[in-house]
Image: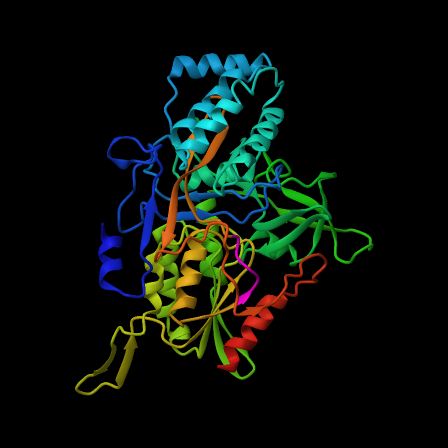
Amino acid sequence: MATRRCARDMSLVPRIRRLPGAACGPGGRAASHAAGPATGLLAAAVLCVAVVPILRPSLSPGASVAAAPGRAGLAVPEASAAGNRAECRRGDFTAVGREVEHIVRDRFFDADAGRRWAERHRDFGRGLASREVFAAEANRRLAELKASHTGLYTPDDWMHHALAAVFRLGGRHRHTGLEGIGADVALTPQGAFVRRVFAGSPSERAGLRRGDEIVSVDGGPFHPVLSFRGKAGRDAVLAVRRREGGPPEEIRASVRRVPLPREWLDAQKQGSRVIWHRGRRIGVIPLFVGAGQEYQAAAQEALQSPAFQQADALVLDLRDGLGGLNPGFVSLFDREVPVLTIAGREGPVRTHSATWRRRMVVLVNGGSRSGKEIVARALQRHGLAVLVGERTAGAVLGGSAFPLSDGSLLYLAVSDVRSDGERLEGRRVDPDVPVPGSLPYAGGRDPQMERALDVAAAG
């Protein structure tokens, strides 16, 4: 694999060790998702999801990126699937519950824990009357595994669509797009607060700001999926509260239907910029998602642009969103790569650096998971970056997505992962400069980003 050659040849790139449990089948395969091209995705790489779960805030989902396009995690014979769907329509999820039991037993990275879990929860779907009730009960039980990258998601969950897009699932789970307004919203006990407004999105054009509370959409409670379903091409009316206890104000935002990977990549490209701060040129790259070679390529393209080549420092924002960063991402900052000075016969002398070697700050928080944690920790360990923000999630396992016959997806940890011998699952990465998060009614301000810019400019 190209990624493994890179790990041998470049000392900075963290070595990822995948530790499958006894649940692996012949040949050590931990899941029926085969690895994609080695140059694009590392078979053991992991995708961290930092979106607040819609219905189940106690779960910490994530994903590996070891999926081949169009491959289902576990094939359910069509006749059985049809029978199971009919059973669900009659208000009995026994068969779907058994699918979950069998997958956990056969695929969970800790074989003994998986078998014990399946024994304890035999036929747990019996008598459950709806998909929502079944999903809530399944997640309550899956939480006993105490593993990241584990959860059950219905088509009403944003994570369902994100997983389908990342794993490029086929059939009825194929991701073709999702209606939305281009904003990342955190669901908290206090309400739904805008965490990130994607650059160039309808939400940016509508004037949404970080920290805004979305009280309602078109008169109904806010829901990341249901609030916008079927409304593409129309305006949604948002009631937005900007100060605690204040009256909501009305904002109209155009709803668009777009494939999530395109939305993520566009947001990264349009959000990458160089700004002046305290007399310094600071490059900023917001990396909301790393689960694909295109996101690393876009970051590299930004770093090689004339504006970034003239920047004094860099802020790499790895907060929230989806992870999935290939460990090879660290090679973009390898200071051992030679700098070329090119002088033509008559032209000016030009200097070209293939990698970033100036001051760098990496923003992290509790939504920085898995692949993002691996990269952040490697940059910190090698002294290439100062980490600013909050402790990361400590969610570093390899997961796979398994389609279920009722249309839901089971997301399950199928591999343990260590980076340079260090196990980050459950441990987290500490920032060098702690800055607490502040979201509700922030008025568009971002104290963590402000501090990161200060640190970058001070170098």
Q: Nearer the viewer, residue 419 or 225?
A: 419
Q: Which residues are magenta?
A: 388-393
- What is the chief secondary structure element of the magenta stretch? loop
Residue in the image at 45% along x and 56% along y: 373
Q: Is residue 356 above or below residue 9?
A: below
Q: Is residue 235 above or below residue 85?
A: below
Q: Is residue 398 left or right of residue 440?
A: left
Q: Is residue 148 left or right of residue 227?
A: left
Is residue 403 in view from this perspective?
A: no
Residue in the image at 67% along x and 61% along y: 438
Residue in the image at 38% along x and 75% along y: 309
Q: Quadrant of residue 130?
A: top right
Q: Nearer the viewer, residue 307 or 345?
A: 307
Q: Is residue 285 above or below residue 184?
A: below
Q: Position of residue 253 (x, y in %)?
A: 64, 49
Q: Position of residue 415 (x, y in %)?
A: 38, 41
Q: Nearer the viewer, residue 183 or 124?
A: 124
Q: Position of residue 241 (x, y in %)?
A: 76, 53
> How are the colours assigned in the image?
rainbow
Q: Is residue 352 left or right of residue 103?
A: left
Is residue 187 covered in magenta? no
Is residue 61 in view from this perspective?
A: yes
Residue in the image at 35% along x and 32% along y: 23
Q: Position of residue 350 (x, y in %)?
A: 27, 82
Count the marks: 0
